[in-house]
Image (cartoon, rainbow, N blue to C red):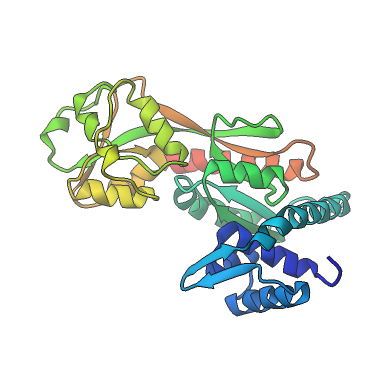
Amino acid sequence: MIGLTVRQMRYFDALAQTLHFGRAAKLAGVSQPALSSQIAELEERLNCRLFERGGKTVRMTDEAHALQPRIERILADIRDVETTARRGRPAMEGRFRLGIIPTVAPYLLPHVLPELKKQYPALQIELRESVTASLVEDTATGRLDAFIAALPLDYPGLVTEELFPDRFFLAVPAGDPAFASPPVPPESPALERLMLLEEGHCLREQALAVCGNVRPVAMASYGATSLTTLLQMVAHGLGVTLVPEMAARAAGVMPDLRIVPFQEPMPQRLICMAWRRNRARQDECVELARIIRALDQAVLAA
């Protein structure tokens, strides 16, 4: 690894994660030309091709696959050195890398980020939106300081702090006679038209758990990577979908869409913050969780 810079290794890691130059540049916080230039220089120093470019697709070569675990170990050691160096410095300042799942990010962040900027202007939040499994892995390996997701989290090395419950509602086409008399029982045959997010999204598993023994037949024909896409599909009469309360507030104003409740006790998910055990930034994680809980209560009250 003689001659390789930490910057090049970080850019390599970002590109290996995303397999997309634009997304890798965004993840690394640089311009795409700057990232491409450093990757090209890295390949020149190693005298081998690491990434195959083909149109909009990027593929790792065998040499890159062999190099990846070694670079990950080096970067993890560097992050540990940075964490150790932070001890004794004031909390809530500097870079804080926060992950968040897609079914929470667009509804929580508009409230959280302005409040953090107001209370802690020296804190620089870097965000990564991804599914729970990726956030767990990135936090365990030190790529993230903490993340926000839904319980349960099956990883013993994480500390979790509960933030707030998020009840589930049902988004249905406006005027659909099957939902003329809510609340909706979880065993309703109309839930066979349930559409789900693609594999990997925790909301998919939560939706299947809520619906109990009803088998969603629409799931075989439709799948989406975002809740916004699902809601658009519902508005066009293609089916129904589960919607968290924080998203229901925004979805309720969509034309041709209606939000209806489930029977009591209403199903819900529990949103939490999680971070790696024994990390130096635990106090900051706890403080961030406190701010989010207070904001959630204020938003609900409003």
Give me the residue at 35% from left, 51% from top. 228
Q: Which image quadrant is residue 241 in? A: top left
Q: Nearer the viewer, residue 99 or 256?
A: 99
Quadrant in the picture for the N terminus? bottom right
Residue 294 visible in the displayed image:
no
Residue 239 x/y as whole percent = 22, 41
Task: Tell me if 1 is positioned left or right of 164 in this view.
Answer: right
Give me the residue at 65% from left, 60% from top. 62
Q: Nearer the viewer, residue 147 or 5?
A: 5
Task: Tell me if 56 is positioned left or right of 233 in this view.
Answer: right
Give me the residue at 53% from left, 50% from top. 130
Quadrant in the picture for the C terminus? top left
Give me the residue at 78% from left, 41% from top. 279
Residue 157 x/y as whole percent = 71, 33
Residue 282 visible in the displayed image:
yes
**Taking 184 as reference, is 51 above or below it?**
below
Residue 67 x/y as whole percent = 73, 59
Q: Which image quadrant is residue 122 in? A: bottom right
Task: Tell me if 159 is positioned left or right of 219 in this view.
Answer: right
**Taking 14 as reference, is 284 above or below it?**
above
Task: Tell me if 171 is positioned left or right of 138 in this view.
Answer: left
**Taking 270 as reference, is 133 above or below it?**
below
Q: Which image quadrant is residue 133 in? A: top right
**Taking 47 as reference, is 217 above or below it?**
above
Q: Nearer the viewer, residue 171 or 5?
A: 5
Residue 178 x/y as whole percent = 14, 31
> Could you tell me how many numbered marks the image carries?
0
